[in-house]
Amino acid sequence: MPEYGIPKSKQGLLSWSWAEQRLKKSHNYWISTVKPDGAPHCMVVWGLWVNGKFYFSTGRKSRKAKNLAQNPRCVIGTEKANEAVVVEGTAAIAKNAAILKQFVTLYQKKYEWDMENFGEPVYVITPARAFGLYEKKFMGSATRWEFGK
């Protein structure tokens, strides 16, 4: 992270397992999308981190869904800013029946909310990069991960 005064050594960086633990445990997530006019839109969603991807559902007519239809690039972040994980990626509507069934089961377990007949799309965000920021050790541990390169 240039110009933050963070050492160039990899010693002390956060592990990906640290990030995934927070992605799985977060109850609320921030999602940022881009409106057609280029303005940002940020909202809280419930979701699941499963097998290296983030899944959530929203109404077809929601601002998030409209934005993602125009521009699939988005950002999600965990709820605890002092141990933040921020993921940049691309969203698509999940269509794999086995994954959707798993989503319904895990969502019910996590949120006690039945998604079986919700009828709205489930989105999957595939990460391009992620950032881990641990407030207590920020200067020695701020970490960036790159995916698909």
Image (cartoon, helix red, strand yellow):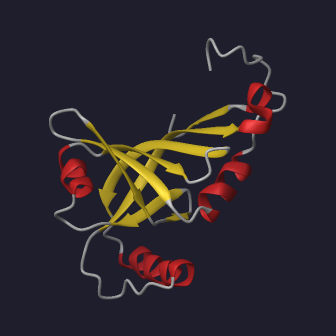
78 vs 31, left or right, is right
- Residue 142 image point, x, y percent: 69, 31
Quarter of the image holding residue 116? bottom left
51 vs 15, left or right, is left
Q: Is the N terminus in the top left, top right, bottom left or bottom right quadrant?
A: top right
- Residue 110 image point, x, y percent: 56, 78
Q: Nearer the viewer, residue 105 or 6?
A: 6
Q: Is residue 47 above or below residue 3?
A: below
- Residue 87 image point, x, y percent: 51, 44
The residue at 24%/34% (across/down) is 39
Quarter of the image holding residue 82? top right
The residue at 27%/70% (across/down) is 121
Q: Nearer the viewer, residue 49 or 112?
A: 112
Quarter of the image holding residue 26? bottom right
Q: Is residue 112 above or below residue 72?
A: below
- Residue 148 image point, x, y percent: 50, 40
Q: How many marks?
A: 0
The residue at 60%/57% (across/down) is 23
73 vs 12, left or right, is left
